[in-house]
Amino acid sequence: MCCREVNGLVWILKSTFLILCLVTFVVSQEQSKSSDYILGDEERLEMIVAIWGEVQKPGEHRVPYNTTLVELISIAGGPTRNAKLARVQLTRQASEWTMSPQALEQILKESDAHEIKDSELKRRFDSASRKILFYDVNKYLADQDMVMPPPVLQPGDVVFVRTSSWTFWREAIRVIHEIALIASIYAWYLRNTK
């Protein structure tokens, strides 16, 4: 076999491997869909979602089917005073694979040139199966016409309520205040001990 035939065979094997990874991912997504919902205590459909960040009770929560993002924040005890409700992040498993043909072609080129590591390849495929949305809860709460309803959650969704940037400044001012207080007490002590 000449070098060109070997390279062609390697390319075919890599392409086959990538296609098998894609097919395996799609099949596993379809199989997991059937068991995402749970029959609740009152014979109602429930699901498990997670909420992290600036809420009173972060973690996994078992919620009724059709729960909205705002309802989940309420179920989690509401936001803390440090919550940034203007940009709440919702991450969900995409129902479809969202990698463009150009991105897939780029991965094949990098793979052929041995420029891509297995860990990077896995990261790119994983990120292609997630969808990240941002929602402004403050705008929803101020909207009397309900023009922009909150998104309805799906099983496995992860909600992240970020910390407000004011929290950093509030903490910085508190620390500076305490340092200034200690410095003034020390200066007073030095003045009175002479």
Image (tube, rainbow, N blue to C red):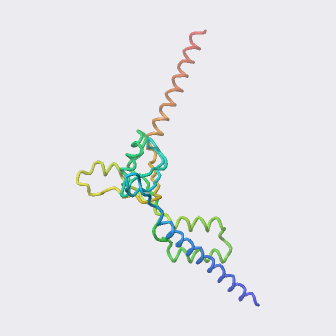
173 versus 90 height, above or below: above
177 versus 75 height, above or below: above
Q: Position of residue 154 (x, y in %)?
A: 42, 60
Residue at position x 66%, y 81% in the image: 13
Residue at position x 40%, y 42% in the image: 77
Q: Quadrant of residue 189?
A: top right
Q: How many marks?
A: 0
Q: Is residue 179 left or right of residue 150?
A: right
Q: Position of residue 25 (x, y in %)?
A: 55, 71
Instruction: Please identify the residue farthest to the right as the structure is shown.
Output: 1
Quadrant of the frame with the N terminus: bottom right
Q: Is residue 69 left or right of residue 145?
A: right
Q: Identify which residue, 74 or 143, lies in the foreground.
A: 74
Q: Is residue 1 left or right of residue 123?
A: right
Instruction: Please identify the residue farthest to the left as the structure is shown.
Output: 145
Instruction: Please identify the residue farthest to the bottom as the structure is shown.
Output: 1
Q: Identify which residue, 151 or 145, lies in the foreground.
A: 151
Q: Identify which residue, 63 or 102, lies in the foreground.
A: 63
Residue at position x 52%, y 72% in the image: 26
Residue at position x 51%, y 30% in the image: 176
Q: Position of residue 152 (x, y in %)?
A: 36, 58
Quadrant of the frame with the C terminus: top right
